[in-house]
Amino acid sequence: MMALFVRDVRLGLRAGGGALVAVLFFLAVIAIVPFAVGPDLKLLARIGGAMLWIGALLASLLGLDRLFQADRDDGSLDLLIMADRHLLPVTVLVKCLAHWFVSVLPLVLAAPLLGLFMNMEPKAIGATTLTLLVGTPAITFIGAVGAAVAVALPRGGLLVSIIILPLTIPVLIFGVSAAYGAMDASAAFLPPFLILAAITLFFAVLGPIASAAALRGSAD
Amino acid sequence: MRPCGEMILHGRGARKSGLLMRLVAENLGGERNGEVLFSGLGFSVAAGEALLVTGLNGSGKSTLLRIIAGLLPPSEGSLQMEALGDEYGSIADAAHYIGHLNAMKPALTLRENLEFWRQFGGAGPGRGRRSIDDALDAVGLAGIDDLPFSYLSAGQKRRASIARLLVVHRPLWLLDEPTSSLDSQSEQRFGQLMRDHLGDGGLIVAATHLPLQLGKSREIRLGAEQHAS
């Protein structure tokens, strides 16, 4: 299983920067917000956490459709499905973790820098980054289900996004409200943050199982 | 023919359990997109035996192999492996599958690809499991293991796929047109590897148009009745 993680990380880094594309997209989204909203620094600081979340959510959807399709295109997926000694959901979980590590973790690491663009307080930046760190794995796990359903479609990218966006709304809601909880004395940080952590753990189980079922069904 | 085959098997491939692995299909049927390709198919392959699946294009050779590999459900009938042992959880787990695609990543080197499949296939006791260098040697790819897989020619890619059969031991080999794009020398080498595998008590089910250098083997012909001339 470690071998699969290492292989996928290596592919992600070598095949020409899926990670870099996502970070650049994230940068582009955050960089144009001040132009759209106007030079109101207080307003920017207030919406900063939400903007970082939206940017990270959209950027982490990029490349999700290739999660299983790349393996299907070269025939590896058949062999991954056949290897019953590793349970297929565990295989999927490992692939998700590798994808998160290569393509999504850089977004989390870039978030503090982009938070400065939004004139956010250091404390708010820290809280938003922490919520992203805890919440984005859930997006990958949900995305794996969409990627598995659309694996046989040649241009499944848009479809994957449309399938999974509604399901990621709870992640977004609790992620952003936890981030606000850290900025605003009247709102709480811990309850939404814990719910966010619970969502991630929940989808860490449900996502790989559902996605393994979809992969088995899609073999032809 | 049968008694002779069994004598050889008892001599060479006797298991700890004393039982021979046997792949048995009864009344097997396969379909693609609702179209029935074959039905009522029955065969058995015992350890040390090879089964060739022949037939015209589209007669269901690949479908049959994918059904055995557990990648497609059979439309009817049953398929089981006798004396599978505790080592393997299912037929798919006990099988190597070479399909039309080589299951190698173009961006990784040949060695990285093989190393991944070797580790993913599970360590296990080393019966019939060769080192990467050994396997590359056996298929004649030694010395170019550091090239990215995408640089290799079609025949070399196929040979890399065959090397994958050697780095992890699986009793059942499912081969779908394994010799496509191989030159005659590689074909002979591959024939020797297959005979070694059979001699070691392995099973082979191969779909092919070209004669494989297997020596003795049985053959089923799919779609013969529909397309008989």
Image: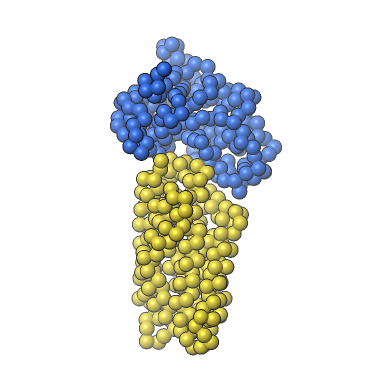
Chain colours: A yellow, B blue
Question: Compared with residue A185, is residue A201 higher up or lower down, i.e. above or below?
Answer: above
Q: Is residue A215 left or right of residue B125?
A: left
What residue appears at the point 52 percent right and 85 percent down from the top-left corner? A38
Q: Is residue A15 left or right of residue A168?
A: right
Question: Compared with residue B81, is residue A220 higher up or lower down, i.e. above or below?
Answer: below
A36 vs A119, nearest the viewer? A36
Whether residue B181 is visible here, answered yes or no, is: yes
Residue A175 position, x and y percent, is 41, 73
What residue appears at the point 40 percent right and 62 percent down from the top-left corner? A162
Quadrant housing the C terminus of chain A: top left
What residue appears at the point 62 percent right and 44 percent down from the top-left corner? B150
B88 vs B79, nearest the viewer? B79
Question: Compared with residue B177, is residue A25 higher up or lower down, i.e. above or below?
Answer: below
Residue B175 position, x and y percent, is 49, 30
In which image quadrant can residue B56 be found? top left
Whether residue B134 is visible here, answered yes or no, is: no
